[in-house]
Amino acid sequence: MAIKRVEDLEAFQYADRIMLMTYEVVSRYPDYEKFGLISQMRRASMSIPANIVEGFRRRYRKEKIRFYNYSQSSADELKYYYKSSVKLGYLKECKEALKLLDSTSRMLTSLIRKTPKMRSCY
């Protein structure tokens, strides 16, 4: 069964969950992190599903893969921010976030592998 909407991709659903979780988590961070860690975490968390959306509608395999890789890079970046948040004492633990991020990244790897090679029109 071909997936027709990006919202039906499990990777997108996980990415959307991590974005919502991140916005909720950073709302409890100290105000002085507003333009630091909070901003970085929000940006990275939004980038994960946004790049999946952009890659989903791209026509050529190479373009699709590029955006799915951007999404994976943002997931790795966000993992670092979550781990840093624990070290800085803003979070006691971040197991759920790391688990969601790892799952999303694995799903993207699978999606990349399954992206069909398209013949060029040229």
Image (spheres, rainbow, N blue to C red):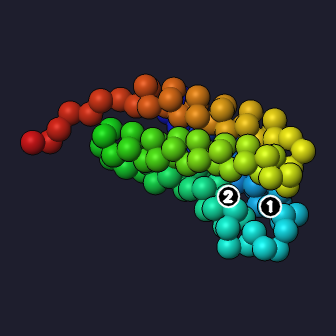
Q: Residue furthest front?
A: 88
Q: Residue at x 32, y 38 (%)?
A: 61
* Neighbours of disc 2 within 10 Å: few (<14), some (14-19), many (20+): many
Inspect the image, locate mark 2, and give the three-letter code of the amino acid beneath it: Met
Q: Which residue is mark 1?
A: 26
Can residue 12 be seen at all in this image of the molecule?
no
Q: Give left or right: position of 12 versus 83.
A: left
Q: Give left or right: position of 2 versus 80.
A: left
- Horizontal and vertical percent position of residue 107: 58, 31
Can residue 54 be seen at all in this image of the molecule?
yes
Q: Residue at x 35, y 29 (%)?
A: 116
Query: Mark 1 and mark 2: span between their CA atoms?
Result: 8 Å
Q: Are marks 1 and 2 in contact (CB under 8 Å)?
A: yes
Q: Quadrant of the C terminus?
A: top left
Q: Residue furthest left?
A: 122
Residue 41's label in the rendered image is: 2
User: In which quarter of the view is residue 26 placed?
Assistant: bottom right
* Neighbours of disc 1 within 10 Å: few (<14), some (14-19), many (20+): many
